[in-house]
Amino acid sequence: MKKITGRISTAHNSLSISQDKDTNSGRIIRQVRALLLSGGKYSARDINRLCNTNDARKCISTLISRYHMKIRKAWTDGGFKLYWYESESMPTLFDGKEALL
């Protein structure tokens, strides 16, 4: 497996489909990053489908730990988590609930 070094390019915004589903693939991590930066809230299932990966949670963990992205998550009433990118200008979580705009 290839080891990812350096920063992920923000110029790569293509969500093209490929057969490689390796979670450590730089292509998949870039796709998940681009998807989250585009806005919106996504479940792991949505991310897996849109980015053609098997383990969106691993990609999200990599983006948080290795690239220090501010990815927020919250449980839904349906019993699954939603993930989204929180920029500096967005309100933060307060007491475990999403801040209202």
Image (spheres, helix red, strand yellow):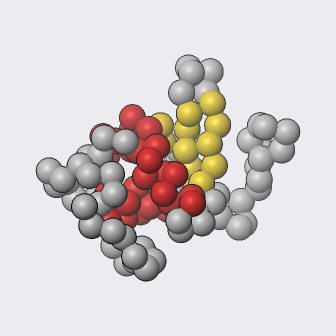
Q: Estimate the x, y position of residue 93 in percent, counting from the top left.
A: 77, 47
The answer to whether any part of residue 14 appears in the image is no
Q: Is residue 86 left or right of residue 44?
A: right
Image quadrant containing the N terminus: bottom left
- Corner quadrant of residue 54: top left
Image position of 78 (left or right of 87) = left
Q: Looking at the picture, how far across and down is residue 37, in whole percent?
A: 50, 62
Q: Residue at x 39, y 38 (%)?
A: 46
Residue displayed at 43% across by 79% down: 6
Front one among 91 and 70: 70
**Which residue is farthest top?**
78
Q: Is residue 25 above or below residue 3?
A: above
Whether residue 6 sits left or right of residue 21 in the image: it is right
- Residue found at the very far right of the displayed protein: 95
* One can see residue 85 in this view: yes
Q: Is residue 66 depicted above or below 41 in this figure? A: below
Count the marks.
0
Identify which residue is drawn at 64% across, 37% down: 74
Q: Position of residue 23 (x, y in %)?
A: 33, 51
Residue 60: percent from left, percent from top = 49, 51
Q: Is residue 10 above or below residue 81?
A: below
Instruction: Name the residue: 52% across, 51% down.
Output: 61
Q: Nearer the viewer, residue 24 or 99?
A: 24
The picture quadrant where one finds residue 78 is: top right
39 relative to 9, above or below: above
